[in-house]
Amino acid sequence: MNLATKKISVHPYVTRKKGVCGGRSIVRGTRIPVWSLIQWYKQGMTIEDVVREFHQLKPAQVHDAFSYYYDNRKEIEKDMTEAFSFPNNCPLESS
C-alpha cells in the first residue's frame, strides 16, 4: 500500500488576522507583513540588516518569516504585488 503524506510546516511567528493588513500574513504580535521583510531582502538587505532595521523583532521572528515565504512563495509574491497596487492597505512599520 502506498501512503501519501502531506508535509505540514509550522510557523510559530507568522499569522493572519482578519482586518489586519488586509488579512495578509504578518509577524505574530505586530502589524508587519511578511511581504515587507521579503521586499527589503529583495532590495539588497541581508537578513541581518532586516533584523537590525526591524529592531522590535527577534531574529527568530525574522527567520520564521523567511521560512514562511519559502514555503508559501506564491502567496507572498501575490501580497507584494497587491500591496504596491493598494499601498494604504497596510502601512509599513520599521522604526
Image (tube, rainbow, N blue to C red):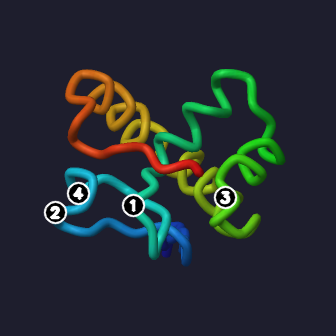
Mark 1 or 3 closer to N-term? 1
Label 4 or label 1, whichever lies nearer to me, is 1
Q: Quadrant of residue 55?
A: bottom right
Task: Classify 15 as above or below 33.
Answer: below
Task: Classify 17 as above or below 25.
Answer: below
Neighbour class for label 4 at 10 Å: few (<14), some, many (≥20)? some
Q: Secondary structure at mark 2?
A: loop
Neighbour class for label 1 at 10 Å: few (<14), some, many (≥20)? some
CB contact under 8 Å: marks 1 and 3: no
State the CA–CA distance, disc 2 to disc 3: 22 Å
Q: Secondary structure at mark 4?
A: helix
Q: Amino acid at mark 4?
A: Gly
* Residue beneath the point at 43% across and 51% down: 33
State the CA–CA distance, disc 1 to disc 2: 11 Å
Camera-nearest residue between 23 and 74: 23
* Residue beneath the point at 27% across and 53% down: 21
Residue 12 locus on image (x, y percent) = 55, 77
Residue 23 is labelled as: 4
Q: Quadrant of residue 42?
A: top right
Write down the residue under mark 1: 31
Q: Amino acid at mark 2?
A: Gly
Residue 62 is labelled as: 3
CB contact under 8 Å: marks 3 and 4: no
Q: Secondary structure at mark 1?
A: loop
Q: Amino acid at mark 3?
A: Val
Write down the residue under mark 2: 19
* Residue beneath the point at 29% across and 46% down: 90
Label 1 or label 3, whichever lies nearer to me, is 1
Mark 3 or 4 closer to N-term? 4
CB contact under 8 Å: marks 2 and 4: yes
Residue 72 locus on image (x, y percent) = 47, 48
Neighbour class for label 2 at 10 Å: few (<14), some, many (≥20)? few
